[in-house]
């Protein structure tokens, strides 16, 4: 995996259901490194701190390999790296291979795979079609958030070097499908209940599902 583009956003406002909304999804490529901090990317807009930023969503990665598929669906959009709101556009990021809890060295930083991106209405608004949310979920390749274990600068051309493989985990794609599945597999959930790369609140919800079923 290699960084193709580093992207950050300025705050963008739009009207949704009669209310003004501010978002940081409109990321643009920059010609230079970005600093991965413990709770966010330095200089990047993170408006909704309830759902973005923080320890387990400090930086968002999306695969360059998925762009052609989406360009085919939405050819009239103004395409550029950062289109999915990602801080890092990454070549050969494969959600079938990376696992929740994997640790990578990239540039000066040490990052840990935490959780897939769950799309919201802002994603649909940017694509001009709320059906894009279902298309994103059905496609199953969500990109991933990472936790920053060691802060530092990263830039285009930096490669991800696996330093520690997660034990008793599942792939990012499997976790994404699990989150949106109505019939969640109990054994799959059990594999990740003790994985501290996943926020405790999310693990508690999955544990509660097991207890009810």
Image (tube, rainbow, N blue to C red):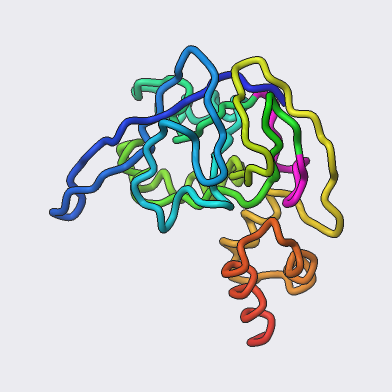
Q: Residue furthest bottom?
A: 212
Viewer-side residue, 22 vs 98: 22
Residue 152 image-quadrant placement: top right
- In the displayed structure image, the side of residue 18 where residue 104 appears, left or right: right
Viewer-side residue, 133 vs 32: 32
Q: Residue 7 magenta-drawn?
A: no
**Residue at point 48%, 48% (across, down):** 53
For the N terminus, the image quarter is: top right
**Residue at point 44%, 55% (across, down):** 51
- Start and end of the magenta stretch? 91-103
| Residue 45 pos. (x, y %) | 37, 37
Viewer-side residue, 124 vs 108: 108
- In the displayed structure image, the side of residue 51 where residue 196 appears, left or right: right
Is residue 210 depicted above or below 12 in this figure?
A: below
Is residue 174 depicted above or below 63 in this figure?
A: below
Viewer-side residue, 43 vs 187: 43
């Amino acid at each position: 995996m290699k960084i193709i583009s580093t992207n950050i956003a300025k705050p963008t406002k739009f009207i949704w259901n009669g209310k003004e909304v501010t978002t940081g999804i409109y990321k643009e490529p920059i010609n230079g490194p970005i600093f991965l901090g413990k709770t966010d990317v330095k200089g990047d807009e993170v408006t909704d701190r309830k759902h973005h930023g923080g320890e387990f969503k400090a930086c968002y990665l999306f695969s360059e390999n998925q762009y052609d598929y989406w360009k085919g669906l939405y050819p009239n959009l103004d395409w550029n790296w950062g289109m999915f709101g990602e801080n890092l556009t990454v070549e050969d990021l494969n959600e079938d291979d990376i696992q929740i809890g994997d640790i990578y060295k990239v540039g000066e930083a040490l990052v840990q795979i935490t959780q897939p991106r769950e799309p919201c209405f802002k994603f649909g608004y940017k694509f001009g079609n709320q059906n894009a949310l279902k298309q994103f979920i059905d496609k199953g390749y969500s990109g991933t958030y990472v936790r920053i274990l060691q802060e530092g600068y990263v830039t285009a051309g930096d490669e991800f070097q696996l330093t520690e493989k997660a034990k008793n985990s599942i792939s990012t794609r499997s976790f994404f499908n699990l989150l949106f599945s109505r019939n969640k597999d109990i054994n799959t959930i059990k594999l990740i209940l003790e994985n501290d790369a996943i926020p405790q609140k999310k693990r508690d919800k999955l544990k509660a599902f097991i207890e009810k079923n």
